[in-house]
Image (cartoon, rainbow, N blue to C red):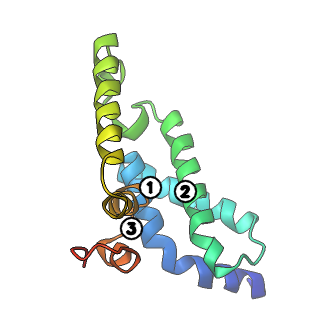
Amino acid sequence: MGGAGNAFEDAVHPLLPRARRVARRVLAKHALAEEAVQEALLRAFRFWNGRRETEVWPWLRSLVIRECLRASSRDAAGYRGAPAEAAAETPEEVALRREEHAEARQALQGLPDGYRRVLLLRHGCCLTEAEVGPSSDCHWVR
């Protein structure tokens, strides 16, 4: 593979578990998530320019998420692996879901900054508790 291939592998290989976690959370279907990660890795390799180590995870994560969105649009069952019969929501269900999302956003915005940061890092960025802990100023995060 040469020098560029080795640099790519050295930088990306440790990030694969995180990439797979992100894909599984977005898609919920294991096979579809694996496929999205593979497509993202191919795209990453194609556009690899010896990125700095600090840039690799955010860049790879965005590629994985984009591939997940592409995969979900191709998937007949719909986004997040919902069953086909559940994909056709009634207007009332759509309104209820939007209301629940608005309430959750409002509750999240009402949290102190440190608590909100922990939730966003853990669930929005798919980081483990061990990864969130050092970046948090909250004493209760391990």
Q: Which residue appears at 37% of the width and 52% of the height?
A: 25
Outermost residue toward the top in this view: 91
Q: Which residue is mark 3?
A: 127
Place residue 85 in its image quadrant: top left
Does residue 124 lie above or below 14 as drawn? above
- Lower position in the chain sequence, tag 1 or tag 3: 1
Q: Which residue is mark 2?
A: 64
Give amino acid for label 2: Val
Which of the two discs, 1 and 2, labels the residue nearer the N terminus? 1
Secondary structure found at label 3: loop
Q: What amino acid is found at the position of numbered circle 1 in the picture? A: Ala
Contact (Cβ within 8 Å) of mark 1 with mark 2: yes
Task: Inspect the image, locate mark 3, and give the three-letter code of the amino acid beneath it.
Answer: Leu
| Res 135 → quadrant | bottom left
Which of the two residues, 32 or 103, is positioned nearer the viewer here? Answer: 103
- 71 vs 56, nearest the viewer: 56
Mark 2 or 3, which is nearer the eye? 3
